[in-house]
Amino acid sequence: MKGSRPEQAMLSRDTDMSKTAATRAVIEGMVDGLNDHRIDDIGTFFADNFRWMGNQGCGTKNGLQEFQDNWQRPFQAAFSDKVCIDEARLYMGEWAAAFGRQEATHSGSFMGIAATGKRVEIRYMDFWKVVDGKIVDNWVTVDFAHVAAQLGVDVFNGEGWEAFDRGEKQPPHPANRG
């Protein structure tokens, strides 16, 4: 981009690196809590007014109660025998990030798809900010399109760019814009 660029990394610029170990302890405890399918006492790790900001299809949850009622309970109703497997975790002061997958059984309705009993992989990325021993912000991306595909639903209606990777379609080029 020529010319001025937007400010970068403003939220993490002044992180206190001395808090890395404390942040790590909160995140590791929280992941264990999620793997134990805890809902009612998950506030041990999250501030009452924390923000959970998800991608399209996941929504945004303002506060612990919305997270429990509008994310945890529907998720556990749709997917049982769930285990969270972080492929990597990164810690920096009050900040932490992870990506990985959940493996679960599709045992309830998910986005209008009736239970199939299939085992699915649910890929995700999480970014957390921890203040005073509690998660206050959580940015989340969950690959629900991948989950739907495993259940036989193509949310892109054949227009996903994987067709380029498989050589089934020719990718457009910016020079040919019309």
Image (spheres, rainbow, N blue to C red):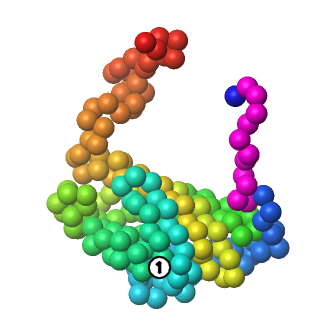
Q: Which residues are magenta?
A: 2-12
In the image, residue 72 lies at what x, y percent?
38, 74
Residue furthest to the front: 4
Residue found 36% across the figure and 27% down from its top: 163
Residue found 38% across the figure and 70% down from its top: 71
Residue found 28% across the figure and 43% down from its top: 155
Q: Quadrant of residue 6?
A: top right
In the image, residue 165 lies at what x, y percent?
42, 27
Q: Is residue 46 magenta?
A: no
Question: Quick one: quadrant of the N terminus?
Answer: top right
In the image, residue 78 lies at what x, y percent?
27, 67
Magenta residues, dominant SS class: loop
Residue 130 visible here: yes
Residue 28 visible here: no
Q: Is residue 5 magenta?
A: yes
Residue underneath mark 1: 64
Label 1 crowd (10 A; few <14 / some 14-19 / many >=20):
many
Q: Is residue 37 left or right of residue 135?
A: left
Residue found 54% across the figure and 74% down from its top: 50
State the residue in front, 118 or 47. Answer: 47
Q: Is residue 148 left or right of residue 67?
A: left
Q: Is residue 116 left or right of residue 163?
A: left
